[in-house]
Image (cartoon, rainbow, N blue to C red):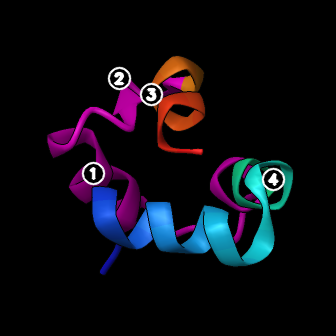
């Protein structure tokens, strides 16, 4: 599962743009989005870009 630390590693490895594209893709399961809402990566189904930029 993804959390803040996992996303930080993904951004470092693959880049911020690639990570954002992954998070916005239709391939990401709803359950994963719900888990990421707990870490405020998503807010009401919308991606919180300011938090992602702070992880880069």
Chain-order first, disc 3 or disc 4: 4
Chain-order first, disc 2 or disc 4: 4
Distance between the alpha carbons at the discs numbered 1 and 2: 9 Å
Element at label 4 = helix
- Of residues 33 and 12, the one nearer the viewer is 12
Distance between the alpha carbons at the discs numbered 4 and 1: 17 Å
Q: Are marks 1 and 3 in contact (CB under 8 Å)?
A: no
Distance between the alpha carbons at the discs numbered 2 and 4: 17 Å
Q: Are marks 3 and 4 in contact (CB under 8 Å)?
A: no
Q: Residue at x 30, y 51 (%)?
A: 36
Q: Is residue 8 above or below residue 41?
A: below
Q: Are marks 2 and 4 in contact (CB under 8 Å)?
A: no
From which residue to which does the magenta span run?
22-48
Chain-order first, disc 4 or disc 1: 4
Determine whether, in the image, residue 52 is placed left or right of residue 25. Answer: left
Residue occupied by mark 2: 43
The mark closer to the camera, 1 or 3, is: 3
Provide residue 11's location: percent of width, then percent of height: 64, 62
| Label drawn at residue 51 | 3
Chain-order first, disc 1 or disc 3: 1
| Label drawn at residue 21 | 4
């Amino acid at each position: 599962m993804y959390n803040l630390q996992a996303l930080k590693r993904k951004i470092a490895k693959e880049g911020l743009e690639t990570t954002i594209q992954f998070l916005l893709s239709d391939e990401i399961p709803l359950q994963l989005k719900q888990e990421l809402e707990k870490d405020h990566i998503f807010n009401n189904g919308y991606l919180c870009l300011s938090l992602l930029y702070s992880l880069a």
